[in-house]
Amino acid sequence: MINYVINKVTPYLQKLYFKNFFDWFIRKLDLQDKAEKLDKKKNKRQHPIQPRRGDIYLIEFGQNIGKELSNTHMGIVVQNSSNNVASHTVVVVPISSSKQLYQTHEKITQADIEMGKLNKLPSKAKAEQITYIDKARMMYKVGKVTVDFMNRLEKRILKNLDIKI
């Protein structure tokens, strides 16, 4: 196996992002182990991690491609709470603290935080990067946003997806 790995990896060693992707590969194996352990803890069809809609979690998004969000960022749970009881996955919208605000983003201010805190405010929810993640990527809960903010974020998501109600 070691010879196989060496032969496959050698041509890529000089690539600019090799170390980041290799480190992510190791981290991803650890997350897979965590996912399997969580699955074994599942009891009566209830997952041990049960986030609620509007919760903010620190999430390990990993090393992704191009302009996809990578590394560790906070994210807002947008999936309905009843689905989060048993499901292994959850729908989240990543949060970024970069200053540039586009029409696909929803601004987050102190008034939008119901519980906990974000280190950098204002921040933004990047509705165009809505994604499913395995709960093993969720590190810990940071806080919760208000119902008013969730209503605004929901409208932003629908607009980004060109869904009319």
Image (tube, rainbow, N blue to C red):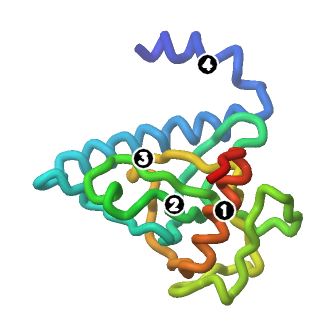
Residue 155 has which mark? 1
Instruction: Name the residue: 48% across, 47% down.
Output: 133
Q: Nearer the viewer, residue 63 or 67?
A: 67
Res. 24 image quadrant: top right
Q: Amino acid at mark 1?
A: Lys
Distance (Cα) linking label 4 and label 3: 27 Å
Q: Amino acid at mark 3?
A: Asp
Distance (Cα) linking label 1 and label 4: 45 Å
Distance (Cα) linking label 1 and label 2: 12 Å
Q: Secondary structure at mark 2?
A: loop
Q: Please name the residue that numbered disc 3 is placed on.
A: 134
Q: Please name the residue that numbered disc 4 is placed on.
A: 9
Are the residues tagged 4 and 3 within 8 Å (C-beta)?
A: no
Q: Position of residue 37 (x, y in %)?
A: 24, 48
Q: Nearer the viewer, residue 73 or 75?
A: 75
Q: Amino acid at mark 2?
A: Val
Q: Position of residue 82 (x, y in %)?
A: 32, 61
Is 69 situated left or right of 116 in this image? right
Q: Is residue 114 above or below residue 68?
A: below
Q: Is residue 49 above or below residue 24?
A: below
